[in-house]
Amino acid sequence: MRILIINGPNLNLLGTREPEIYGTVSMADYLEKLETEFSDDEISYYQSNIEGEIINRLQEDNFDALIINPGAYTHYSYAIADCLKNIPQPKVEVHISNIYKREEFRQKSVTAANTDAVLSGFGMNGYKLALLSLKH
């Protein structure tokens, strides 16, 4: 299975950004773990701080399933939400922190309605849980 993982703004700083919320593991290190554990799958990764670049990557449509952490775009990007609506492949939205325990503006996801599932608050293991859910 070809699985695309997309991370939005500021998630390129995982491992150093607010470690009390996001932990100390970089995405590169976590991806190595996922690629080892899910060696039968082809895992692609893309991160951008730019909304249009995320949409362009999604529209390339060269994946069987999608895991997306839109970062702050979760809360206000109707453009990404519209793009997700047009993707027929299985999609899981992941949030490292529990967005429902964060600031009020972070407690709403405008993108979630256009995904099949949402995982929030499982730390980096949310990506693994999303992968497991896509395989069943």
Image (spheres, rainbow, N blue to C red):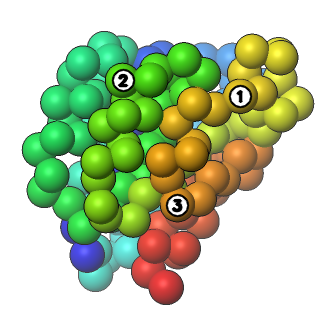
> Is residue 47 depicted above or below 64 in this figure?
above
**What amino acid is labelled 3 in the image?**
Asp
Residue drawn at (25%, 67%) of the image: 64
Which corner quadrant of the image does residue 55 belong to? top left
Residue drawn at (44%, 23%) of the image: 78
Circle 1 SS class: loop
Residue at the spot of label 1: 108
Residue drawn at (56%, 45%) of the image: 113
| First in residue order: circle 2 vs circle 3 | 2
Q: Which mark is residue 79?
A: 2
Q: Left or right: where does residue 132 sit relative to residue 98?
A: left
Residue at the spot of label 3: 116
| First in residue order: circle 2 vs circle 1 | 2
**What amino acid is labelled 1 in the image?**
Lys
Q: Left or right: where does residue 99 sit relative to residue 115?
A: right
Residue 82 seen: yes
Q: Residues within 10 Å of mark 1 (few under 14, many from 20)?
A: some
Total numbered labels placed on residues in the image: 3
Percent x, y for residue 132? Answer: 52, 74
How far, Cα to Cα, is label 2 from label 1? 16 Å
How far, Cα to Cα, is label 2 from label 3? 18 Å
Q: Quadrant of the N terminus?
A: bottom left
Q: Left or right: where does residue 11 sit relative to residue 95?
A: left
Percent x, y for residue 13? Answer: 48, 20
Residue drawn at (48%, 47%) of the image: 114
**What amino acid is labelled 2 in the image?**
Ala
Circle 2 SS class: helix
Q: CB atoms at circles 1 and 3 under 8 Å apart? A: no
Q: Residues within 10 Å of mark 2 (few under 14, many from 20)?
A: some
| First in residue order: circle 1 vs circle 3 | 1
Residue that extends furthest to the bottom in the rendered view of this protein? 136
